[in-house]
Image (cartoon, coloured by chain):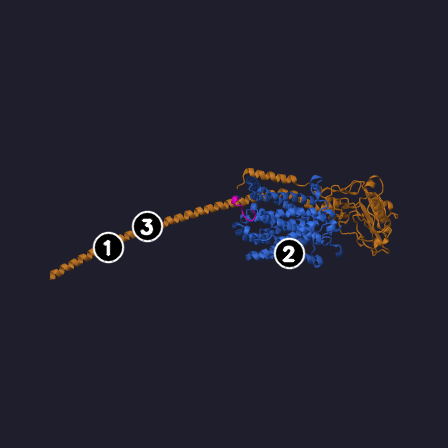
Chain colours: A orange, B blue
Amino acid sequence: MSVSRRKFLGWLGAAGMGTAFGTSANAASNKHFTGYPDSMGILHDISLCVGCRSCEAACNKVNELPPPEKPFDDKSVLDKKRRTTASVHTVVNKYDNAEGTKGPVFVKTQCNHCLEPACASACFVKAFAKTKEGPVSYDPSVCVGCRYCMVACPFNIPTYEYDSAFSPRVMKCTMCHPRVIQGRLPGCVESCPKEALTFGKRDDLLRIARERIRKHPERYVDHIYGEHEMGGTSWLYLSNTSFASIGMREDLGTTAAPNLTAGALGAVPLVVGLWPVLLTGVYAMSKRKEKIAKEEEAQAVGDAVAATKAEGEEKLSAALAKAGKDKDSAIKREVKKALEEAAKAQKEEAAEAKTEEDA
Amino acid sequence: MSQEAAVFGETSPPGKSLYTPFNVIAGIILIVGFVITILRFTKGLGAVTNLDNNYPWGIWIGFDLMAGVALAAGGYVTSAAVYIFGMKRYHSAVRPAILTGFLGYALVVVALHYDVGRPWRLPYPFIMQQGTTSLLFEVAACVALYLTVLFIEFSTAPLEWLGLKRARSIVVRLTMVLTIFGVILSTLHQSSLGALFLLAPSKLHPLWYSSYLPVFFFVSSVIAGLSMVIFESTLSHRYFAHKMDETHLAEKEGVALGFGKAASLVLAGYFTIKVLGISMDNNWHLLGTGYGMWFLVELLGFIALPCFLYAVGVREKNLCLIKWTSGLTVLGIILNRLNVCLIAFNWHLPSDEKYFPHWMEIGISVFVVTAGIVVFRFIVTRMPILYEHPDYKDSH
């Protein structure tokens, strides 16, 4: 099989189709996103939280979640570290031995509503979206249930309804998106008796947080958690102790999740573009090699045959020549022999004649 | 022997009972798997798995998907070697490799139906909304397309079996395009399976997390593909030698030596870039920790060692050593995928919160592998896989 023009054009067409199938992804672009303007957020002042769990109760009520095993005024649940579950969108945890504090420190945990969410970046059916109001929304009507969002979330927030056979959903805090659109406060913020939670525009919240740190440098750690973590989150945290000592990871970095996979996604057009060209080239080379090898083989065989033939002829002519020579010498020999015999006969005759004379 | 008896009884002499050890064990596994299947789809994932909110992915992803896709790489590796690089002497290895690849991918998709919450929505990423920012979208698209490519590539065997000459000749003419398409798709999704974890730098242990993850996964898939061809050929020869034609038997040894040599070289390259990965992130100090020891077990015991053993086996033409090494290499690839997906994942979690599979999860994985073996056996005992169909000799 040789590479005909038609075949080559066919492959070119296939390569073109491959390129057309390539995915386009903004994640691989150099766009810089710092959050929707005027989007809302919540500032959690950890130093003000008393662990009353009112927010948990409100969250449960607002989201119509199943009733808890132990009532919300039962403080014993705080003794064990908890995480969000399919029926609990927010939990308050107690840390007794936080750095540089006397009493226990209480931290509320829920979806942080990242500015560039890992879950949204990970979802292959776009079930997650960062809304312009601030909350990260989830659409269960398209969710396949691959749970890559749960793998991707750096804060370990999304949960899954593993016990549902026919309509399992990913469950997480919605930042009360339906209420926010109506101009109402999220359930947890509304219920907080100590004003540990402040709802507002994220930009305003950052100003408030900075102001508090400036006014009470002795009280706060000089860091607003969520301002830059993983590219920034809509939930912001102020703390009176190091974040690491209250279960909040300080090693997450400031790279937004989509940027982590941008490089890999950017390689797609490269592979789709380069492979067909390279492989077709390799194929053409191996074909050509094969062809040349075949030709060389044919050439070698021809040469060998010719050489054998020539050698054979040479041998033959040599043999013939030798045969001729042999014949000549045989004749000479015979002639010589005959002459010798003749001479001998003559001698004998002469001798005979002499004896006869003597006699 | 009747057709039905042949399904199960081909390896035993005619007239013997259907209750051979293989059939009994396979039968039990299939029945248990069937029962778990019913439980899974009527009671939900929670009833049969130990998955939780910290470990959304278990062995159905770590083993069935991650390892399954890697081990099914023999198809594209072999067809590329033979059709693109022109290594005709391995031609008899193409069909078994394509069959193994096709069944591997088909089973990956089957296993995926168990794992995702709503399997009937698996086409949604293509027909509803395309989440193109997700590497999982790339994986899904490539696996779907590549399964189709493998099906077409494989279809020559059943078409010959059924005597459909015209359809077969159309497929054969597509060989080159399919092979190139297969290499593109495999490069993309093999690497993307590793790239999936690029999104979780805070969860995957730094020794396994690397910006090279996609490269690691792609290169190791080549190793897995080469080793699986040797491994599968060894098993096929043991059980289906009577199905092999002279060409296959004559080329078999060359395939093991050639693929063993290639695997040794690629393993050496893989070892080098793994070490490069540690250097790039300067993670040397982590080698002294518990996870570091485990990393060294993988790096030395399942990458460096098989690399060396393959090299020795090839130099001394020790086929037995090459065969055992292929098994060791396959285990190493499985170990690597389990490490990335499960063992070194969530390494911050205390050990009591870590995941260990439920026996029913293992049951489904065993069920899926067994189903693959049974189907493989059904096909090689009927279709021209290990031998050339007499009507189409010299037609390639």
Which label sits on residue B302? 2
Q: Which residue is mark 1?
A: A336
Distance CA(mark 3)–CA(mark 2): 74 Å
Q: For numbered disc 2, what is the local secondary structure?
A: helix
Which label sits on residue A321? 3
Q: Residue A184 sits in which quadrant?
A: top right
Distance CA(mark 1)–CA(mark 3): 22 Å
Amino acid carrying label 3: it is Ala
Q: Residue B237 magenta-drawn? A: no
Identify the subunit bearing mark 3.
A
Which is more toward the observer, A140 or B292? Answer: A140
Amino acid carrying label 2: it is Phe
Distance CA(mark 1)–CA(mark 2): 92 Å
Identify the subunit bearing mark 2.
B
Q: Residue A185 sits in which quadrant?
A: top right
Q: Main secondary structure of the magenta part?
A: loop
Q: Residue furthest right?
A: A193
Residue A129 in the image, given as x and y percentages of width and height: 76, 42
- Residue at left offset 58%, top offset 38%: A10
